[in-house]
Image: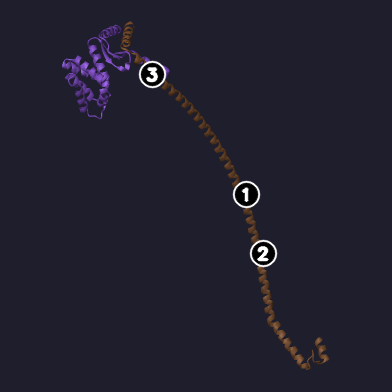
């Protein structure tokens, strides 16, 4: 079991204890996305020279009124342990475990633009067909994708992004 | 005899005194003085002469000994000089040989170093050329990729985004 999975197990235990693991999962993903999109947050939360209590105070300030107390406590624990850089992986592991508990698979989808509900449903259906079981789809906006989608289910990555094609072109030219 | 003749002639006022007695007494005094001289002075003179002869002989012997010694020293010096000449010739010859060997060694080493430096320089030039080519190629590729990305981003409108997403879903569904 990886370190991210161990943290995910702890986060799910907190969520189950508070009776709202789904909310905790959503808050965790939101915070991980917020950190990924803010270099300033990455620096302040990832700086080990800053005392853990100060970093945890930043988490509480950011999540105040936006997340549940259980979510704030769980995220604060992760950041206080100096694992803010592992937040995206922990969030994926939490979603994967929760989906697994329901007999489903979890798909992390990155897109340059937001997907419509119709697109989400068609994508979930297509992924379920391929995985052979229900798939929970979570879409993250990532401008680096440029266009198209990148999906990760467990260890499988289906990359149909413009970024991949640009990278292939760069490698061919080099 | 001369005296007898002179005595027989009698006094003449010139060589023979007028008084014969005076002649004999003078002669006797002369002989006495002569005898004294021969008795006392002659041995002294003879001894002086002998001493002088001995001294001269000794000096001659000493001179001969000195000459022989000088000749011996001269011979020795000539021998030493000859030996010194031979030794100096040997040293000079050895020095020449050593200098020649050192010169040959230095030339060989310089040649080897020059060859090595040339090889290294050639290798560095080749490496640098390859690196420069690779750098230029990478820079051109990067610039071209960035330009392509800019063009793609500029042409990605919402319709195109949706088309790309729909095509992706269709490919996943059909795979």
| Sequence-earlier tag: 3 or 1 | 1
Query: Which corner quadrant holds the N terminus of chain B?
Result: bottom right
Q: Quadrant of residue A35?
A: top left
Q: CA distance from mark 2 to mark 3?
A: 119 Å
Q: Which chain is brown?
A: B
Query: Same subunit under labels 3 and 1?
Result: yes
Q: Quadrant of residue B14?
A: bottom right
Which residue is rendered at x = 64% and y = 63% of the image?
B66
Q: Is residue B74 above or below residue B5?
A: above
Residue B147, label in figure: 3
In the rendered image, residue A79, in percent from the top left (x then y), is placed at 23, 24
Q: Is residue B10 above or below residue A11?
A: below
Which residue lies under the disc numbered 2? Answer: B64
Query: Same subunit under labels 2 and 3?
Result: yes
Q: Which chain is purple?
A: A
Q: Is residue A34 above or below residue B103?
A: above
Q: How is the image coloured?
A: by chain
Is A33 in front, or is B7?
A33
Dot 2 falls on a residue whose secondary structure is: helix
| Sequence-earlier tag: 1 or 2 | 2
Q: Are marks 1 and 2 in contact (CB under 8 Å)?
A: no
Which residue lies under the disc numbered 1? Answer: B86
């Amino acid at each position: 079991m990886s370190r991210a999975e161990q943290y995910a197990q702890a986060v799910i235990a907190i969520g189950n204890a508070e009776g709202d693991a789904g909310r905790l999962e959503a808050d965790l993903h939101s915070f991980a996305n917020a950190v990924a999109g803010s270099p300033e947050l990455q620096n302040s939360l990832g700086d080990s020279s800053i005392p853990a209590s100060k970093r945890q105070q930043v988490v509480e300030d950011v999540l105040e009124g936006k997340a549940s107390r259980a979510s704030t406590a769980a995220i604060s624990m992760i950041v206080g342990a100096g694992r803010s850089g592992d937040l995206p992986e922990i969030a994926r592991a939490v979603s994967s475990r929760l989906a697994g508990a329901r007999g489903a698979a979890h798909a992390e989808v990155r897109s340059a633009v937001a997907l419509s509900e119709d697109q989400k449903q068609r994508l979930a259906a297509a992924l379920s067909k391929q995985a052979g079981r229900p798939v929970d789809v979570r879409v993250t906006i990532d401008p680096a994708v440029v266009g198209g989608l990148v999906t990760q289910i467990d260890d499988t990555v289906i990359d149909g992004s413009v970024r991949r094609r640009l990278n292939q072109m760069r490698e061919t030219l080099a | 005899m001369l005296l007898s003749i002179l005595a027989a002639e009698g006094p003449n006022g010139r060589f023979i005194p007028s008084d014969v007695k005076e002649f004999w007494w003078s002669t006797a005094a002369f002989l006495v003085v002569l005898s004294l001289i021969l008795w006392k002075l002659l041995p002294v003179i003879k001894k002086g002469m002998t001493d002088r002869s001995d001294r001269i002989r000794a000096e001659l012997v000493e001179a001969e000994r000195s000459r022989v010694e000088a000749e011996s020293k001269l011979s020795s010096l000539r021998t030493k000089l000859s030996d010194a000449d031979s030794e100096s010739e040997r040293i000079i010859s050895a020095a020449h040989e050593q200098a020649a060997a050192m010169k040959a060694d230095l030339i060989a080493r310089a040649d080897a170093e020059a060859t090595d430096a040339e090889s290294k320089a050639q290798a560095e030039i080749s490496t640098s050329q390859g690196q420069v080519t690779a750098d230029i190629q990478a820079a051109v590729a990067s610039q071209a990729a960035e330009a392509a990305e800019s063009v793609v981003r500029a042409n990605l409108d919402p319709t195109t985004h949706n088309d790309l997403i729909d095509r992706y879903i269709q490919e996943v569904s059909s795979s």
